[in-house]
Amino acid sequence: VPAGLKAELRSYQHHGFEWMAALRDLGFGACLADDMGLGKTVQALTLLLSEAESKRSAGLPTMVVAPTSVVQNWEQEVKRFAPSLKVMSLRTTTRAERVQRLAKIKDYDLVLTSYALLRLDNEVLVKERFHYLILDEAQAIKNPNSQTAKAARSMKARHRLTLTGTPLENNLLELWSQFEFLMPGFFGSRARFVRRYGAFQRDGNTRQSLEQLRTRLRPFLLRRLKSEVDQELPPVTEITLRCTLGARQRKLYEQIRTTYRAKVLGTADDSGVERASLGVLEALLRLRQAACHPGLLPFEEAQKVTDSAKTQMFLSTLQQLLEEGRRVLVFSQWTSMLRLLRTELDDQGITYAYMDGSVRDRGEVIARFQSPDGPPVFLISLKAGGVGLNLTAADTVIIHDPWWNPAAEQQASDRAHRIGQTKPVMVLRMVAEDTVEDLILALQERKRALVRSAIEVDGTGIKDLSRDDLEAIFGVAGDADANTIEATVVP
């Protein structure tokens, strides 16, 4: 362990450091895929300190690329665990300032940037050579055709490392993309990978092919689960809370379902489910919004329905939690839903912290909530706060609206259930009964099954939908009692 490390590594973290160092010596890349909250950052910093102290980096800096919301966390973790490393953070600079600072890049041990800036600054960065190139929350390159993945692959570095708590989210091809970054050519071409292992659940991945994939990955992907390595972490309890739509909200929901039924099923019959994906996406979005709150819908008729069964359940549940002295994280995928909840909390005089993608000084917001006298509620958009944040002041997590990807929900709940948490954690998922949200739960379980088979599964789940699933969502001919809704968009 390097002398400059200001942390006491747990045994599994020490093993992770040694494993990464061994693969470095052999010239291989590595994917550290420990369960969320087990300290992947401190393991990576241990490795980087070792490189610096042994002079192996030989004057070349390391670059860490992370989601925007996580870059500041890296700044704090370096100060805490590896203060001897000289850090350049590109998070708050303009492009002109970044170009000017990058001219002095060799004066630093560590350069921190975001995936967005990696794309913007790619022309400058590809001219540099790094000792290590580390991708944190590496599921960001799961789409090999994305500009982010292409920018990452174009970089020059002696060694490559990825950190992710969700190495596989939606399909096996995501693994190909990550390993094409780590060790180009490791799995051969994309087409060859698909022929050998399949990509989606519909490909009927065989037990033999998945076992072959596990065997191939095993030396280069290290994954430990909380249940396996950290008996000190307090337990987590997951509960699904269900509500029943009231008469007016149910009527609105059925009107929307009927409106989209003929269009979606007709296109699916004529061209297949995937060809109908745009119509399916729009229909599923509107049905999910109708199940949560009519105020989310852009239809004039929907604005006349002001009651929401889920909002009523949320408020009564939150009141009970606060009476018990709990600190609560509330996640929604829609900032518009969070705005509705803010109005409700303001009306009831409940103080809260708030973060979505537009919030600039996230560190200040997080510090305010983490303080002992901070607000008891933190409203967070799933996209802005679902990864990389440490929010252990909370002991309760509410997933207000279920998402297709169980890994995204797991990321959200693990903001509280991670190292540093001393209290049992409760995760509450809120579901409107007899709505599309039931289907979402079913699809989540399908994805978990694929995870268990291969490793571990964003997307909308459209590729996992069958014709039968569409029948379940939109109903069969003759079962729709409701009228259609006039799709007049609110100006």
Image (spheres, grey):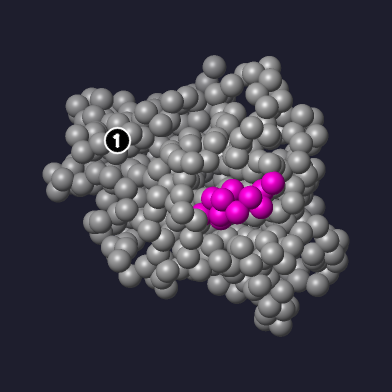
Residue 56 within the segment the image draws in magenta = yes
Q: In the drawing, does residue 335 fall left or right of residue 267? A: left
Taking the view exactly as shown, the residue that stands out farthest to the bottom is 208
Residue 329 seen from this side = yes
Q: Is residue 463 above or below residue 380?
A: below
Residue 382 seen from this side = no
Q: Which residue is mark 1?
A: 369
Residue 359 within the segment the image draws in magenta = no
Residue 233, image x and y in percent? 32, 63
| Residue appearing at x 74%, y 34% in the figure | 125
Please state which of residues 454 and 113 is positioned toward the viewer in this rendering. 113
Taking the view exactly as shown, the residue that stands out farthest to the left is 323
Dominant SS of magenta comes to helix
Q: In the drawing, does residue 83 fall left or right of residue 33? A: left
**What residue span does the magenta drawing correspond to?**
46-58
Q: Is residue 187 above or below residue 422?
A: below
Residue 443, image x and y in percent? 55, 61
| Residue appearing at x 24%, y 34% in the figure | 374
Q: Quadrant of residue 220?
A: bottom right
Q: Is residue 419 above or below residue 58?
A: below
Please state which of residues 380 and 85 is positioned toward the viewer in this rendering. 85
Q: Quadrant of the C terminus?
A: top right
Q: Quadrant of residue 154?
A: top right
| Residue appearing at x 24%, y 33% in the figure | 375
| Residue appearing at x 52%, y 27% in the figure | 298
Label 1 neighbourhood size at 10 Å, few (<14), some (14-19), many (20+)? many
Q: Quadrant of residue 117?
A: top right
Please state which of residues 49 and 148 is positioned toward the viewer in this rendering. 49
SS at badge 1: helix
Task: Tell me the amino acid under the disc marked 1.
Answer: Phe
Residue 345, image x and y in percent? 26, 30
Please state which of residues 478 and 92 is positioned toward the viewer in this rendering. 92
